[in-house]
């Protein structure tokens, strides 16, 4: 009997089904644990509900000895994609190289760049068995204030550990240019927002101009995740304050660690935030025992030794970047490139995020 607090996937969304005519034989050929079985039945297939970016499936095989073997398959979504986005090969190779020096990464199994299999690149990896803290902790999990506080600190420590990885020794120097990261991010996300703009969202010109004019004079280069949130962590089911995995490496690169923290804080909804923020919360950062955004910044700076006069630039950048990501998602829905009904009204969130940017800018002044 499955543990009810362990993370599980749900029904596959309409229009996002996998074609197993070619996929099933490919998996048997490329996954060692499958190609030793004879007359192996097709797996049961479920899909994780996020689905805002890459589509993620759980494939559950029953082996000859009745043992259950689960795999995670990641593929790009349908529709128009931003240049460089949804690169499954890059995501696969990055995690394979990072695994030996950062144990939170799942084990990679196989990568496929043959579009004849399921119509796009994809890769298959280990299924980590644990708790994923999504919008709310799973029912049946009783976590105390002290345990929540320790989970929060452990999450931040795992981000700090990533920022301290020697990416050159790990063979990841080729991952990105590194130097000039801040300028590239500001110009890049500004351009992505402009290209994805629809009639029902603001131009964003004021925020983009402020970011362009207020770039820090110094940058630090390290390995950054760029989507570090609680719902991309896997927790130990026996000790929920302990982190056993970090997921979703699509946006990882060589970048500035303070910008990575700013990205995380854009998702960090705390208990005393307004109703709109609380209504769009995607992770349990509001729980009693979690740090506030200000406390997160102070903790990170104290642990890393970084010195900044003001965190406003990184805060505004994180909020604007999230607005651009949300707008790209809405653009696909607006142009009927995806049918996920969860995206129908997210244009309103773009308005809110840009308002938060302006609010942070005025607060800085």
Image: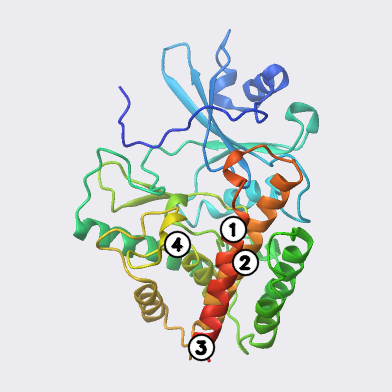
Give the mark nearest the N terminus, 1 or 4: 4
How far apart marks 3 and 4 lie (CA) works out to: 21 Å
Q: Which residue is mark 3?
A: 364
Q: Nearer the viewer, mark 1 or mark 2?
A: 1
Q: Nearer the viewer, mark 1 or mark 4?
A: 1
- Residue 177 screen position, x and y as percent: 72, 70
Q: Residues within 10 Å of mark 4 (few under 14, many from 20)?
A: some
How far apart marks 1 and 3 lie (CA) works out to: 25 Å
Q: Which residue is mark 2?
A: 321
Q: Which mark, residue 277?
A: 4
> In this view, which residue lies farthest toward the front?
200
Q: Which residue is mark 1?
A: 348
Is 166 left, or right, of 148 in this rendering?
A: right
Is 313 left, or right, of 196 in this rendering?
A: left
Give the mark nearest the N terminus, 4 or 2: 4
- Residue 78 screen position, x and y as percent: 73, 39
Quarter-wise, where is residue 19 in the image? Answer: top right
């Amino acid at each position: 009997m499955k543990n009810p607090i362990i993370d599980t996937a749900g029904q596959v969304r309409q229009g996002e089904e996998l074609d197993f005519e070619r996929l099933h034989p490919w998996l048997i050929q490329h996954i060692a644990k499958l190609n030793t079985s004879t007359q192996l039945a097709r797996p049961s297939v479920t899909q994780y509900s996020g689905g805002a970016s890459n589509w993620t499936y759980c494939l559950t095989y029953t082996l000859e000895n009745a043992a259950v073997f689960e795999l995670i398959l990641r593929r790009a979504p349908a529709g128009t994609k931003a240049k460089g986005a949804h690169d499954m090969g890059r995501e696969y190779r990055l995690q394979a190289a990072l695994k030996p020096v950062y144990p939170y990464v799942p084990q990679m199994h196989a990568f496929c760049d043959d579009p004849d299999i399921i119509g796009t690149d994809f890769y298959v990896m280990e299924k980590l068995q644990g708790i994923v803290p999504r919008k709310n902790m799973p029912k049946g999990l009783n976590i105390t204030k002290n345990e929540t506080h320790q989970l929060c600190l452990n999450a931040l420590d795992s981000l700090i550990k990533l920022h301290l990885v020697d990416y050159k020794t790990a063979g990841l120097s080729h991952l990105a240019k590194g130097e000039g990261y801040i300028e590239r991010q500001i110009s890049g996300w500004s351009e992505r927002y402009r290209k994805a703009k629809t009639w029902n969202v603001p131009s964003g010109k004021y925020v983009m101009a402020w970011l362009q004019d207020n770039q820090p004079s110094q940058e630090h280069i390290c390995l950054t995740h760029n989507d570090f949130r609680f719902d991309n962590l896997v927790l130990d089911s026996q000790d929920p304050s302990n982190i056993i995995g970090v997921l979703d490496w699509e946006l990882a690169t060589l970048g500035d660690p303070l910008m990575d923290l700013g990205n995380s804080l854009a998702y960090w909804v705390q208990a005393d935030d307004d109703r709109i923020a609380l209504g769009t919360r995607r992770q349990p950062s509001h729980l009693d025992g979690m740090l506030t955004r200000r406390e997160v910044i102070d903790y990170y700076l104290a642990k890393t030794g970084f010195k900044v006069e003001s965190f406003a630039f990184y805060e505004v950048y994180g909020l604007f970047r999230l607005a651009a990501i949300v707008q790209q998602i809405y653009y696909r829905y607006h142009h009927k490139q995806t049918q996920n009904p969860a995206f129908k009204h997210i244009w309103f969130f773009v308005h809110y995020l840009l308002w938060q940017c302006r609010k942070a800018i005025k607060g800085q002044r």
